[in-house]
């Protein structure tokens, strides 16, 4: 079992926070807790049940994204407006599972319309209403990282995605990307070492048919090697 510092440098901030709360003899725990409490890790959503997790298709899509494409394919303006109205209504009045689905679709639509803050807000609402799907956490973390949110915001979502779905290469790839950014920001070698471990794990679990995802993983691996040997 890893300790507080090991979890921290591996980007597992939720587990590091839990260890900091428990390890009362560790003199450095207070400086870690200052960070974790600033980002309100105590309020981070907790899974309530085990689900069969979503499988990424070879073209990097998911079944949950089909509704997005169906809405985008609507050419009649009135029908499109009605579809959006129904989405928004579901987000207010439906049960939690459908609320999460609605917010997930809205997040994607906002992302495609370049409304990035609204997109991330919807992803966070998705996780709040259904904290059991790795896809929701993973896309939240991936989008946060894409638009330069703090790694301390981003990594708990990626950590939870990996916990729920440890066979999805995408989550390890995103973890490697964020750990690399932490290394560049803080110049702490353990972040770089764990980024390399994460990208190797991504490569290990990436399926043969996931050609485009593997290209991204390979590109990140090459960049990491440059940091290691320069």
Image (cartoon, helix red, strand yellow):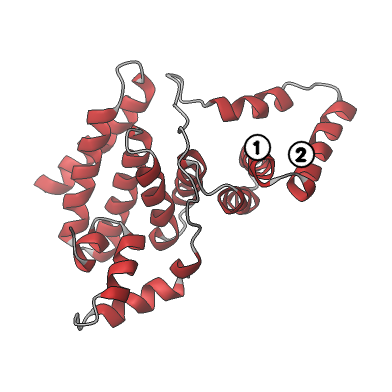
Q: Tag 2's secondary structure?
A: helix
* Closer to the camera in the image, 205 or 176: 205
- Nearest the viewer among 190 and 20 is 20
Mark 1 Cα within 10 Å, few/some/many (few <14, many 20+)?
many
* Quadrant position of residue 77: top right
In the image, 212 versus 206, the foreground residue is 206
- The quadrant holding residue 73 is top right
User: Percent from the top left, x then y, of residue 2?
Assistant: 18, 60
List x then y, in percent, for residue 165.
Answer: 38, 38
Instruction: Residue under label 2, please give it.
Output: 87
Looking at the picture, how far across and down is residue 89, in whole percent?
A: 81, 44
Measured along the vertical axis of the image, is residue 60 above or below residue 121?
A: above
Q: Distance between the residues labelled 1 and 2?
A: 8 Å
Percent across and percent down for residue 135 are: 48, 38
> Does 12 sit above or below residue 197?
below
Q: In this view, does 203 lie above or below 137?
A: above
Left/right of residue 137 with respect to residue 163 in the rendered view: right
Quadrant housing residue 229 = top left
Q: Which residue is drawn at 34% across and 68% down?
A: 17
């Amino acid at each position: 079992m890893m300790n507080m510092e090991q979890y921290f440098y591996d980007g597992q901030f939720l587990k590091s926070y839990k260890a900091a709360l428990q390890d009362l003899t560790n003199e450095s725990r207070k400086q870690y807790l200052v960070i974790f409490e600033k980002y309100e890790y105590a309020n981070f959503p907790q899974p309530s049940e085990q689900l069969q997790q979503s499988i990424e298709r070879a073209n990097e899509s998911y079944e949950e994204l089909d509704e997005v494409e169906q809405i985008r394919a609507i050419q009649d303006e009135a029908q499109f407006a009605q579809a959006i109205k129904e989405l928004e209504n579901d987000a207010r009045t439906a049960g939690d599972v459908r609320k999460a689905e609605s917010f997930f679709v809205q997040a994607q639509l906002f992302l495609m319309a370049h409304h990035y803050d609204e997109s991330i807000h919807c992803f966070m609402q998705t996780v709040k209403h259904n904290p059991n799907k790795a896809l929701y956490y993973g896309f939240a973390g991936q989008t946060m990282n894409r638009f330069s949110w703090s790694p301390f915001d981003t990594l708990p979502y990626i950590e939870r995605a990996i916990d729920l779905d440890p066979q999805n290469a995408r989550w390890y790839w995103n973890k490697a990307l964020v750990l690399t950014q932490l290394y560049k920001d803080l110049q702490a070698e353990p972040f770089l070492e764990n980024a390399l471990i994460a990208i190797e794990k991504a490569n290990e679990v990436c399926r043969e048919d996931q050609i485009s995802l593997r290209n991204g993983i390979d590109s990140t691996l090459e960049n990491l090697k440059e940091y290691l040997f320069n």
